[in-house]
Image (tube, grey):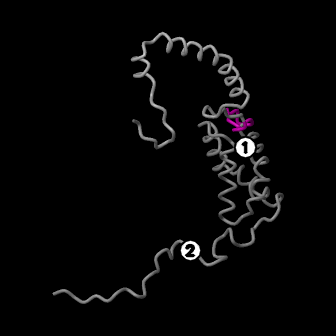
Amino acid sequence: MAENQSPMIDGPVAGMAMAAELGNRPWQKPPKYATVEEALEFYLPRLTEPQVYDQLLDVMELGIPLTTIAESMQIGAVMEGMHTIDVGILVMPVLIEMMAYIGDDADVEYNLGMEERIDEDKISESNIALAMKKVRARLPEEVEEVKEEVADMEPAEQAEEMPAELSGLMARRT
């Protein structure tokens, strides 16, 4: 027999897990370390701990940029409420230099991550201007060649080759 089930009234509201009371998250409370100096006193001893030291060297050998490592460390500390994001940004150069020193001390090849990346999809404005100049220089020659080809064609071929004048994006062809 089917039981009559009443609607669940005392259950969670949809999306309730997505919201929390203001101040319940670590980053919504005052930070544990408010200055750059205090934050450095938090980071630097941890970098020299034997377990962290060995893991850091392993990650460096894999070629992961030191900027990426430092960024993930400071973002994790911000999420834990150790310091604010602005203190984290100010601490990052010191963290990168400390990791570079650790890598140099252990004779490990590392990638600073400071090299300028070349975005192959982005073309500089000077290259675009140069290309446009070359196209403009060739344009009159190509236009003359097309005019000569059209003049050499028979009238029937010209009608077939030339599309009808369209007046808009959605204009119908006749």
- Quadrant placement of the C terminus: top left
The residue indicated by pointer 1 is 99
Mark 2: few/some/many CA within 10 Å (<14, 14-19, 20+): few
- Which residue is at a point 64% across and 41% down the rendered structure image? 57
Tell whether 22 sits left or right of 93. Answer: left
80 or 121, nearer to the observer: 121
Q: Is 158 drawn above or below residue 87 in the view shown?
A: above
**Nearest to viewer (mark 1 / mark 2):** 2
Circle 2 — which element?
A: loop
Please state the total of marks drawn on the protein image: 2
Q: Are marks 1 and 2 in contact (CB under 8 Å)?
A: no
Circle 1 — which element?
A: helix
Mark 2: which amino acid? Ala
Q: Position of residue 147 (x, y in %)?
A: 55, 15
- Which residue is at a point 76% across and 40% down the rendered structure image? 101
Residue 19: which disc?
Answer: 2
Mark 1: few/some/many CA within 10 Å (<14, 14-19, 20+): many
Q: Is 97 drawn above or below residue 161 in the view shown?
A: below
- Quadrant placement of the N terminus: bottom left
Q: Which residues are magenta?
A: 104-114
